[in-house]
Amino acid sequence: MTAAVIDGKAFAATLRGHVGELARAFETKAGRKAGLAVVLVGEDPASQVYVRSKGKSTLEAGMASFEHKLPVETSEADLLAVVEQLNADPAVDGILVQLPLPSHMDEQKVIATISPDKDVDGFHVINAGRLAVGLPGFVPCTPLGCIMLLKDRLGSLSGLNAVVIGRSNIVGKPMAQLLLSESCTVTIAHSRTKDLPDVVRRADIVVAAVGRAEMVKGDWIKPGATVIDVGINRVPGAEPGKTKLVGDVDYAGAAQVAGAITPVPGGVGPMTIAVLLRNALVAAHRNAGLELAADAI
Ligand code: NAD
C-alpha cells in the first residue's frame, strides 16, 4: 500500500483565501479591518522568521498587522504593559506573543495577561478550560489545523482509536481534547509511555508531536491508518553542510503502510498560520459584535 498524501499546503491556501474573502466582508460591515498584533521579544532566528511570515500572511488576508519587536533585555513588567496596551486597543482583535520568551520572563504570567477574547493562540487557561468543557473559545492553531485535515480526509472521526504522541499544552493536550470532542477513543502517549510501538499499532489516527526526528517507524503503523506528523526537525541533508526538515515519523516507512499521511514540510506546518488568521477573524467578529456563522470557516 502507498499512502495518500494529505496536502496541507493546498488546504491552507484555500483556507487563507476563504479567510481573506470574509475579512473583506468584515471590513465593509465593521468599517475597519480585522487586526492581529504580534509581539516578539529578542532575536531568536526561528521566531523572527515566524513573525515575519505571520505579518506578511496577515496583510495578504486583508487584515491589519501590528508588530511589536522588543529588545531581549526588556523587563517582564514592560512586556506586560505592552500586552495591556494591546488589550485596550480597539483596532487589535487578536494578540500573539511569540514563544519562547527570554528566560527572565514567566511565560504563563504573560499568557495570563492577554485578554481571553484576544487570545488567538488559545493558550490562556480560560480558553484551555473552555476547550476542556466544550464551550466556544479559541483553540490552539496547530491542533485545530490537524483536526481540519483529519475531518477533510475522513469525514466523521466518531469511534476511531486516536493516539496522540506528546502532551504539551500547545499541541498534545489540546489535540487530545479536540479528538475527544469528535468522539474518538483517545490515548495520550508521552516520554514515559511503555511499549509505545504497541500503543501506536492500535491507532486508526496517529498524531505525532514529539520533536524527535523520524522516531515513529513504519512497522508501528496499523495498515490503513491516518498519520498526522506535527514534528519539525532539522537534520543533516544529503549534501555536506546542508540541512533538511523531517517530521517525527519515518515518512518513507510509514507511507508504505498508512492510508494517508501528512508530509514534512507541506503538511501540518502551513495550517498553523492559516488557522491563526481564521482565529483572528473570529475574534474580530466577536469584538465587533458581528455574526459569523458557526460553519463559515
Ligand atoms: P514539547 O517539547 O513541548 O513536547 C514534546 C512531547 O513529546 C512531550 O510531551 C514529551 O512527553 C513527548 N516525548 C518526548 N520524548 C518522547 C519519546 N521518546 N516518546 C514519546 N513521547 C515523547 O514539543 P511541542 O511544542 O509539543 O512540539 C512537538 C513537535 O511539533 C516539535 O517538533 C515542534 O517543532 C513541532 N511543532 C510544529 C508546529 C507546526 O506548526 N507544524 C507547531 C508546534 C510544534
Image (spheres, helix red, strand yellow):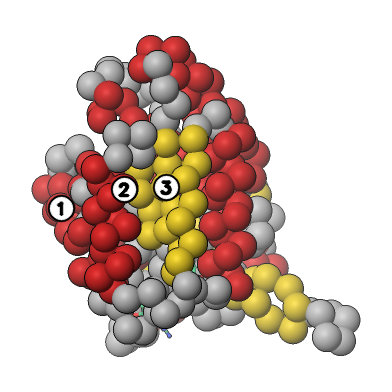
Would you say 32 lies left or right of 60 here?
Answer: left
Q: Where is residue 117 in the image (x, y as percent from the top left)?
A: 23, 42
Q: Which residue lies furthest to the right in this view?
A: 239
- The structure residue drawn at horizontal position 56% and vertical position 59%, both measured from the top left corner, is 50
Residue drawn where x is 41% and y is 22% of the image? 32
Of marks 1 and 2, which one's residue comes earlier in the chain?
Answer: 2
Tell me the residue at 15%/40% (across/down).
135
Q: What residue type is labelled 3?
A: Ala
Measured as percent of width and height from the top left, residue 41 is found at: 44, 69
User: What residue is disc 1 on?
Assistant: 126
Mark 2 nearby-residue class (10 Å; few <14, some 14–19, many ≥20): many
> Could you say which disc has been placed on residue 37 in the image?
3
Amino acid type indicated by mark 2: Leu
Where disc 3 sits, the SS reads strand
**Contact, mark 3 vs mark 2 (Cβ under 8 Å):** yes
Q: In this view, does 185 lie above or below 79?
A: above
**Badge 1 element:** helix
Locate residue 38, reporting x and y percent: 44, 53
* Quadrant housing the N terminus: bottom right
Find disc 2 in the rendering and name its residue. Answer: 86
Front residue of this view, candidates 204 and 212: 212
> How many C-alpha atoms fall within 10 Å of the one at disc 3: few (<14), some, or many (≥20)?
many
Q: Is residue 22 above or below residue 159?
A: above
